[in-house]
Image: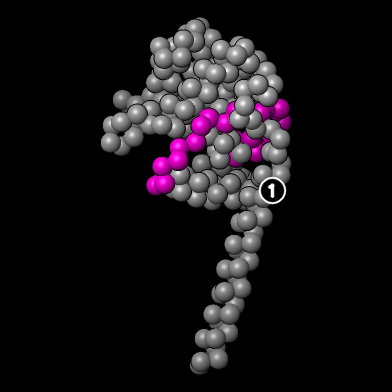
Amino acid sequence: MLRTLTNFFKIAFRLLELGILLMVLANFWVFALTSGRTYTKISKMPPRDCALVLGTSPKMRSGVANPYFTARMDAVGTLYHHGKIKKIIVSGEKSENYDETEAMKNFLVYNEGIPENIIIKDPKGFNTHKSILNCKNTYKQKNVIIVSQGFHNLRALFFARNNGMNALGFDAQDVSKNESFYRNHTREFLARDLAVFYYILGISPEE
């Protein structure tokens, strides 16, 4: 009985090791495929006709402004005012009493000084993959600058590459608050694993 339990735990430990290794390798693959396609300095950013801004909630649960949202909007403003983009697709979720795209548009117009007529709202960007597909198929944009935090841009660029887009990423400032930083980076690590898993199996991801 003891020998059986020992063998069981050995096998379980080996499987756990293998699982962790595959997860790390999947993340390395995403990093490798998107290497050199993200930028943090506006002076180095090649121009594109259009920016695709990935949505997030404009406010935290406490009701205060979401720093991830604000940083993304500031990044878009930087791109526009440095002449790197001519039009903007804001892609996010819209539901009853909640509209990320309207919040993004209003912020860009009233806080960043961007003309309203160059902003296109995609209210069906329910997840990262859907935003990428809508950008390509609905709005006919392939050569875009994707705007989000750097950890998120990697997965977005992975989706874009796999859908035949020539996208680049401009990284909005990350949030250094410990709770948010570790939670979001851990979540994104696992999301990249799922993205690779779905890609290998040919499944359309829901995240």
Residue 2 placement (x, y as % from top left):
51, 92
Please give the name of the residue rendered at 52% of the width and 86% of the height, measured from the top-left corner. Answer: 5
State whether residue 22 is above or below residue 89.
Answer: below
Q: Residue 10, located in which quarter of the rendered image?
A: bottom right
Say if residue 122 shows up in the picture: no
Residue 180 in which image quadrant = top left
Residue 110 in picture, x, y percent from top left: 40, 11
Q: Does the magenta stretch include residue 98?
A: no
Taking the image as shown, residue 126 lies to the left or right of residue 87, namely left
Which residues lie in the magenta part? 155-180
Disc 1 secondary structure class:
helix
Mark 1 crowd level (few <14, some 14–19, many ≥20, 10 Å Cα): some
Image point (66%, 45%), residue name: 30
Inspect the image, locate mark 1, and give the three-letter code of the amino acid beneath it.
Answer: Trp
| 92 or 145: nearer the viewer | 145
Q: In which quarter of the image is residue 140?
A: top right
Residue 112 visible in the current orientation: yes
- Which residue is drawn at the image coordinates 56% and 74% (left, top)? 12
Does residue 67 lie above or below 111 as drawn? below
Count of marks placed on residues: 1
Where residue 38 appears, x then y in whole percent?
A: 65, 32
Q: Which residue sits at x=55%, y=91%?
A: 3
Front-lying residue, 76 or 117: 76
Identify the residue position indicated by label 1 in the image.
29
